[in-house]
Structures are given as C-alpha cells and as structure tokens.
C-alpha cells in the first residue's frame, strides 16, 4: 500500500521520527521540485515509491509520512535547471543523500552515473547525464535517536588539565590482540577495556578521533586498490561512518553513543576531527552525490565571474559556502547534534580558516566564528582550529579569537629543528616552551590556546621523524610526489631501519627528548597514536590511503619498546602532577625581586648565569636552561589557592657534546632531585652544585624545599 502523505513541517531539517511517523524537510533555494524516494534495500536500483513533496515553506520542501518507521531507507531527487554557467546542476536522474541524514547505509559505488554530466561528452560538465544513479548511491536511514544515557555527564576537563591523544578508530584497534576480534577496528573496540586502560596509564584526558563522519572513497584510489583511510572526504555531517560499526544492520549510531559513554565513564572526553571546509563531491568535474544536486549555487562557493567553477581554498576541489545562512545553519546544526545527541565534548576543525573567510579573506570576526562564540551549547565545548588552509593568506596561526585553541605548527617545527641540531633555534624555542606568547597573546589568549604537538596523523610518526631524512611514499601510487618535503627530520646516520647499536641508541634518546619536551612545555600537549612505543609507517609521511598494517598501531611494539612506553607514561605523569607546567597565564619574566629564582621564569646558561642578549643571538647555541618557579601567587588552582610547588629546572642540550651546568642555589633550604634524564636513569642529586648533561639529552630537576 502506498504510504499516506501529509503536509508536514519545514522544521527540523532532515528525517525526524516523532514516535508516530516521519517528517521530511529539505532546503533548496533554487529547486523547482523535490521527490522523496523510498527504498527497501541499500542496493536497490529503483525506489519502491517516489513521492513528490508539494509543500514548500521558506525554501524548505517538506512532507510527513505517518506510516513510516525507523529503519526506512530513503533519498531525494531534485528538479530544477541544469545550467552550469549559472551555477545550477539539478538532475533528477541522480539520487541524492540528505544533508541531515543521521545514518547512511552503504558506500558510493563509482560508475559513470554518479556524475551529473556525460563523461564522454565533448563539453564535459556542460552536458547533462541521462543515466540513473540510484543503484550506486548510498541510502539514508530514518533513525530512532532514543538511547539510554543513564547518568552520563560531560567530564568538563579544564584546558589546564587536558592531554589529547589523536587516533583513528580503526587503526587504533585493528591489530590489538586483547580486543575481541569482532570488535577490532570499531567504535566498540575503541571503547574496550584494553584501550581505555592504556590511555589512562598515559594520563590521557581527551581522545581526538580522526573523521568519523560518513565519507566517500575517491574513485582514483579505488582504481589503484587503495581507500581514503583518513576520511577527510565528508558526505554526511550527521552520520557516523558505518565502516567503524561492528554490525552491518545500521547500528552505527548506537555503537558510537556507547563508545562515548564508555570514555566518559573512564574520565575522558571525546573530541571529533571535523571537515566542514569542503565535501567529497570535488570540483565541477566531480560526482553528484548530495549538495551539488540539491542546490549547487547555495551550498558551494562559486566565483562571481564564472559560476561554472568552484572556489577552492582547501585543495580538495570545493569550499562549502558558509556565507549562505542555510549552509551556516547546516554546520551549526551538525555541531549541536554531535554535542547534544551524541554527547561529544569538542571539535578540531580541519582547515579552519576556510570556515572564516568572510567574504574572501580570513576574518576573526566572521559570522561563523562569532556565531560559535555566542552559541549557548557550542561555546561551552572545546574548539580547536587547524589554523591553515591553501587559499591566499591561509596560514593564520594565532589569528583565532578567544575561546579557541589552535594546533601550533610553529611549536612542532621549532622543536623538531632544535633537536635535529639546526642553528639559531634558541630564541624561538624559549617562546615555544613557555606557551608561545608571541603567537597567542595578541588575541587576548593564554598559553592554553596552544595545542602543542610533535607529530600528528599528517606526517612522519615520532619513530620515523628520527629515522628518515626523506619521505618514502611510493605505496601511495603517486610516484612519491605527495606528502610534505619539509619534515625537519634526521635519520642520524642510516636511512630507515638499521641494526646499528649506536644509531639505535641515539634515535631512542631523541624520541625521549621529543616526548619530554612535549610533556614539559606550557600549553596543551597532543600525542599521536602509537608514538608512545615507536610506531612506524616506514617513512611514509602521507598514509591517508593506507587502510592496512602500515597505518594501524602495531601493539607488539608495546612489549618490544616497553622502556619507551614506560618513559612516556612517566613524563606525562610528572607533567600532570606539577601545575607549574600547565599555567593558565603567560610568564611575566618577573617575580618578587629576590634575585635568581625570584622571577616566574628565568632563562639560564650552562654556567648558571642568566641569558644575555649575545647568548640569545648566538647561532651556534644549542642548549638552554629554563628555571620555573613554582610558588608565585599569580597562578591559582580551581579553589583560588596560590600555586605553591617545587621550582623546576629544565635543561635541553641538542649539541654533540656533554654540558656541565651549574645548579641554582636559593636562600631557602632544600635540595635538587632529578626527575627526568633522557640519557640514563634518574638519580637523586641532593646538594650537588653541578650536573653533567649528556649530548642530545634533556634533564628535568625539581628543587624541593626542606624544613629548617
């Protein structure tokens, strides 16, 4: 029996089950008609029912079907002009995914029919394809969002206590021997006890998941036997990717919520890496999957002088048009959905400057950024920007407004260069260690706006950073042209794997140096999956298409590199227990006027004297001492108590020879204790006046006050 159709409502957008029926609402400003298509199976080539949506309110097409239930598969066909020169690419022969779909069944199966134009036509995208695409387009799923959250609460971990761990849902668990086989590579596998316990042992407070929104695999990659493993090719901003579900019956929404609930119960937040800057439809020669066929001129940024093309600030073919109020609403509705319905705790925005180009240049007062700042839901969660895109003036590190943190690429590059042995790094290193005030103070933010990282998913792993001089990306089938050539890496004598004990010992020390520097720097640290025990990608610095063991975490390394793992746990435990390493305010470079050690931070030479102008300007300097006073009243805890901790002394020596450095002495009685030594096991120093720091090594000392 053909389902009944009632007028329905224009709000909320998408397919909404209200307990009695389903309301459908789809925005299209320029459409001339919309058909709702109902399917029985995800692979169906023909819809069972095609229902014209005759109601239109405020450019939203809508209908209510009282006979439908959750689990119903659907899509849209949208009628209108096919006029690429005017920016319109309507083609009702193409089945389209609902931008507000809460779940999507199946993947795009690439075929000539996925394109809105005739691939063989001499005019390419100016032609209009007559082939139907329903058999190769995934189907949307009507979802019942009910879930038993119980007493789930957002952990609300302050930035000053946040330690982020970046990982991929599948890559984190695909090879874990203690995760049940049927759960490996899934949301539920990530929420299993072995993973939660491992993260807790590292003192992680927030997991940052690489994209989990429904994404399309590039046709070019599939033809070479590869996949878009990273997932930065979004086609569904509300739909969890079913690749990471343990079952094939559409349970990805429930399983995602179960994962979040488990992380919250373990005291950790869940942050999503989200891609709103572009979609998986590519440029004007790309497929018609969703937005292009619904209303190309509204959803995408098109040049005013040539609406046939797409504006591309992303390097991915298109840029989502957040200047349009309905598209801005789509992004904001998506973000709110993930917070209110899926209970996530924050977002890392891929290529964030694209979202704030208003109209063409990056604007910290753009409508997107200002709207988030005022939103009662989104202003309370963690907002992290990747502060660069590929458009003009796209490197905007430090340019985001208060309320935002940013991936600090300047920190990454400086720390890499320093430990590689580059000259002239000392002045910048001091700024990076102390929270990058030169970058974030102008916008009125503090050191916690800096998300510090040495490595991320994009680039070398920590192990490869000290094992390769050059990228080795031939497995990506792009003749090694992809990936960055500027990695600030060093192989320390041998390119790649080696059995040389000398090289291996030096690399091990460099890994410890980089991990310790990350843990001890002011700001918010971020560690990437597997770096804690030496994961390798064999020199591939762009493994975006490697859905295989090259990208997965090899958990056998946790045993073979147990010393590195234990070291990582220890340095982040130390960082967590010393609040002086997680200041909310920048150092002022002054204190109580009591001489050496009276300042909140003092920069020291190896002889124990304060750094002078000539020391800062010396290009041959490769070592630096940082004395952090722990008992100054300008830093307070959550209860308003003044910070009263031990004074810390960090000494970093990237030179090729040992440095003997003098230990500061204070009026108050006490003694120095060595907490970290990347060259050898730590030891108690007592009242020693000097300490020898090995070449390519880092030391952390604590001056502990004694009575009397």
Image (cartoon, rainbow, N blue to C red):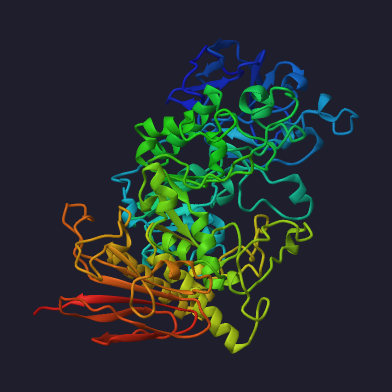
Q: Is residue 115 visible?
A: yes
Residue 294 occupies quadrant: top right
Quadrant (top left, top right, bottom left, bottom right) of the N terminus: top right
Observer-nearest residue: 299 or 287?
Answer: 299
| Number of on-image labels | 0
At a point 47% along the width and 75% down the height, the residue shown is 512
Residue 130 visible? The answer is: no
> In the rendering, at what x and y percent does residue 88 appear?
72, 21
Please say if 697 is above or below 152. Answer: below
Dividing the picture into quadrants, the one containing residue 324 is top right
- The quarter of the rendered structure image containing the C terminus is bottom left
Q: Position of residue 624 (x, y in %)?
A: 42, 72
The reply, left or right, for residue 301 in relation to residue 339 is right
Residue farthest to the left?
708
Residue at the right extreme, as displayed: 122
Q: Nearer the viewer, residue 195 or 581?
A: 581
Q: Position of residue 50 (x, y in %)?
A: 66, 20
Closer to the camera in the image, 369 or 30: 369
- 354 left or right of 282? left
Asked if residue 251 lies left or right of residue 544, the reply is left
What residue is rendered at 52% in x and 55% in y?
409
Q: Of all residues shown, which one is farthest toward the front?
A: 614
Counting from the top left corner in percent of width and height, residue 51 is at 63, 17
Residue at 24% x, 76% y is 703
């Amino acid at each position: 029996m053909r389902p009944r159709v009632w007028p329905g409502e224009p709000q909320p957008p998408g397919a909404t089950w209200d307990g009695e029926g389903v309301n459908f609402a789809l925005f299209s400003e320029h459409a001339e008609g919309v058909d709702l298509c109902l399917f029985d199976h995800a692979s169906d080539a023909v819809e069972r029912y095609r229902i014209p949506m005759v109601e239109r309110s405020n450019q939203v097409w809508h209908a209510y079907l009282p006979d439908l239930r959750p689990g119903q598969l659907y899509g849209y066909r949208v009628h209108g002009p096919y006029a690429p020169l005017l920016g319109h690419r309507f083609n009702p022969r193409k089945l389209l995914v609902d931008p507000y779909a809460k779940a999507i069944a199946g993947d795009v199966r690439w075929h000539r029919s996925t394109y809105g134009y005739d691939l063989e036509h001499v005019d390419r995208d100016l032609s209009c394809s007559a082939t139907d695409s329903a058999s190769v387009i995934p189907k949307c799923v009507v979802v019942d969002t009910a879930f038993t959250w119980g007493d789930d609460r957002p952990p609300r971990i302050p930035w000053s206590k946040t330690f982020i761990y970046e990982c991929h849902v599948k890559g984190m668990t695909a090879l874990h021997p203690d995760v049940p086989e049927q759960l490996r590579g899934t949301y539920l596998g990530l929420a299993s006890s072995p993973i939660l316990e491992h993260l807790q042992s590292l003192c992680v407070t927030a997991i940052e998941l690489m994209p989990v929104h429904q994404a399309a695999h590039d046709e070019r990659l599939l033809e070479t036997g590869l996949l878009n493993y990273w997932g930065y090719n979004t086609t569904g901003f509300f739909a969890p990717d079913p690749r990471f579900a343990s079952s094939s019956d559409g349970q990805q929404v429930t399983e995602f919520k179960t994962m979040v609930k488990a992380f919250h119960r373990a005291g950790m937040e869940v942050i999503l890496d989200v891609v709103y800057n572009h979609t998986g439809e590519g440029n004007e020669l790309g497929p018609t999957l969703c937005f292009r066929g619904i209303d190309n001129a509204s959803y995408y940024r098109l040049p005013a002088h040539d609406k046939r093309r797409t504006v591309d600030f992303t390097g991915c073919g298109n840029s989502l048009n957040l200047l349009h109020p309905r598209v801005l609403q789509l992004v904001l509705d998506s973000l709110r959905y993930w917070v209110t319905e899926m209970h996530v705790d924050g977002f890392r925005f891929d290529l964030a400057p694209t979202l704030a180009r208003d109209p063409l240049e990056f604007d910290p007062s753009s409508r997107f950024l200002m709207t988030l700042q005022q939103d009662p839901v989104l202003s309370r969660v963690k907002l992290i920007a990747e502060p660069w895109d590929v458009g003009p003036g796209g490197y905007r590190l430090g340019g985001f407004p208060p309320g935002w943190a940013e991936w600090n690429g300047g920190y990454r590059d400086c720390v890499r260069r320093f430990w590689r042995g580059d000259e002239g790094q000392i002045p910048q290193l001091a700024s990076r260690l102390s929270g990058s005030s030169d970058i974030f103070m102008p916008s009125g933010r503090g050191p916690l706006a800096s998300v510090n990282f040495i490595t991320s998913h994009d680039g070398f792993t920590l192990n490869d950073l000290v094992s390769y001089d050059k990228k080795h990306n031939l497995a990506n089938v792009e003749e090694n042209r992809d990936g960055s050539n500027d990695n600030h890496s060093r192989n320390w004598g041998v390119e790649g794997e080696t059995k040389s004990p000398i090289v291996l010992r030096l690399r091990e020390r460099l890994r410890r140096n980089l991990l310790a520097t990350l843990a001890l720097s002011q700001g918010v640290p971020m560690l990437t999956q597997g770096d804690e025990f030496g994961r390798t990608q064999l020199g591939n610095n762009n493994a975006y298409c490697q859905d295989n063991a090259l990208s997965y975490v090899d958990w056998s390394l946790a045993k073979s590199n147990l010393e590195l793992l234990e070291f990582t746990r220890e340095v982040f435990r130390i960082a967590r227990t010393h609040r002086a390493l997680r200041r909310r305010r920048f150092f002022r470079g002054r204190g109580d006027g009591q001489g050496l050690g009276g300042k909140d931070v003092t920069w020291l030479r190896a002889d124990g004297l304060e750094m002078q102008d000539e020391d800062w300007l010396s290009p041959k300097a490769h070592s630096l001492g940082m004395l952090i006073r722990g008992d100054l009243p300008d830093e307070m805890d959550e209860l308003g108590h003044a910070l009263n901790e031990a004074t810390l002394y960090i000494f970093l020596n990237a030179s090729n020879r040992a440095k003997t450095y003098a230990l500061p002495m204070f009026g108050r009685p006490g003694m120095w204790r060595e907490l970290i030594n990347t060259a050898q096991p730590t030891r108690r120093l007592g009242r020693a006046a000097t300490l020898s720091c090995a070449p390519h090594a880092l030391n952390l000392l604590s001056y502990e006050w004694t009575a009397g």
